[in-house]
Image: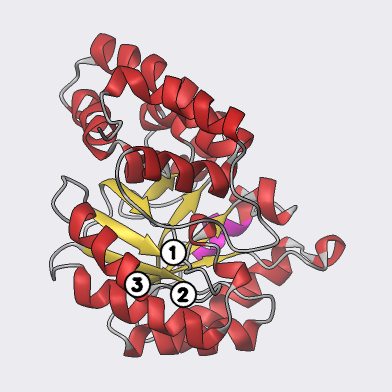
Amino acid sequence: MNLTGVLAPVPTPFDDGDRVDTTRLKAAFARWVKGPLTGFVILGSNGEAVLMDEDESDRAIAVAREAVPLGRTLLAGTGRESTQAAIRATRRAAALGVDGVLVRTPGFFKSQMTTEVFVRHYAAVADASPVPVLLYNFTAMTGVNLLPAAVSELARHPNIIGMKESGGDIAQVADLVHGTPNDFPVLAGSSTTFYAALSVGVAGGILALANVIPDVCVRLYDLFRQGRHDEARDLQRQIVPLARLLGPVYGVPGLKAALALTGCDVGVPRPPLMPLADAGVAALRDALAPFEQIAV
């Protein structure tokens, strides 16, 4: 399983009846797999996984597995609030053929989420998982932080093989990289700080932006790997306005609106999320213009 380069955390389409739209998902994958991405994550944060039930989640994974060619990495998000629910989701995803699972931190009982709790939780999931496990830290969403001390301990587990860190704190990213073995890939989850994260040693990125402008994201990674740092930094500066809109400003509604502007129909967000307002769509159109991605 390749965990270097750029992977896309794909959105989940819903139809007018608020059902998972497998037809749209198949069509979107047919487009995405033609690009240069290393792989894909189904049911990540951008996939609105927390708004889906277990049957819906399984159907989305099944579509993804059918669409993604063997040899391209396919991860499924299987994080749940309870350890047993995460284990069950992980086993189902493994049975559906994913290469590995991405397990976000539980966060409802925030004050109780200590390093000891996280270590016990992830070790139990990894012990029970038929496929490799990646840790997933996204403090802005969960309200908890999987600290480097916990990650360093968990990286010794033979079935925990990497991590996605979605925060933009480059000092923490550096601590995660330097506190884990060389063969334990840390993947960046923030497009706005991708170059900086590469500079402190991440193996690649799982980037929402890669759904929209995959060639550009891969180009930045390749420039960095080739030592062409001036060009990589310049490209990073170019993507920041769009990356901000897709991340902290508009989130999932922004991602789906941006994809619609590029001719990729993945529908609208699932309630309670709302479609992006016209002003936001106009801002996205302006941010996309330099990349010539807007469908005509």
Q: Closer to the N terminus: mark 3 or mark 2?
A: 2
Does the residue at mark 3 contact the one at mark 1 (Cβ under 8 Å)? no
Other-residue count near label 2 (Cα within 10 Å), few / some / many at <14 / 14–19 / ≥20: some
Q: Which mark is residue 20?
A: 2
Q: Closer to the N terminus: mark 2 or mark 1?
A: 1
Query: What's the CA distance linking mark 2 and mark 1?
Result: 6 Å
Check disc 2 and report its element: helix, strand or loop. Answer: loop
User: Given the image, on which type of amino acid does mark 3 rest?
Assistant: Gly
Classify the position of the N terminus by image quarter.
bottom left
Residue 288 percent coordinates (x, y): 37, 25
Does the residue at mark 2 contact the one at mark 1 (Cβ under 8 Å)? yes
* Residue wearing tag 1: 13
Residue 99 appears anywhere in the view? no
Check disc 3 and report its element: helix, strand or loop. Answer: strand
Residue 37 appears anywhere in the view? yes
Q: Outermost residue, right direction? A: 111
Q: Closer to the N terminus: mark 3 or mark 1?
A: 1
Asked if residue 152 lies in the magenta stretch, the reply is: yes
The residue located at (28%, 23%) in the rendering is 291
The residue located at (50%, 55%) in the rendering is 46
Residue 195 percent coordinates (x, y): 38, 25
Query: What's the CA distance linking mark 3 and mark 2?
Result: 22 Å
The residue located at (43%, 84%) in the rendering is 58
* Residue wearing tag 3: 100
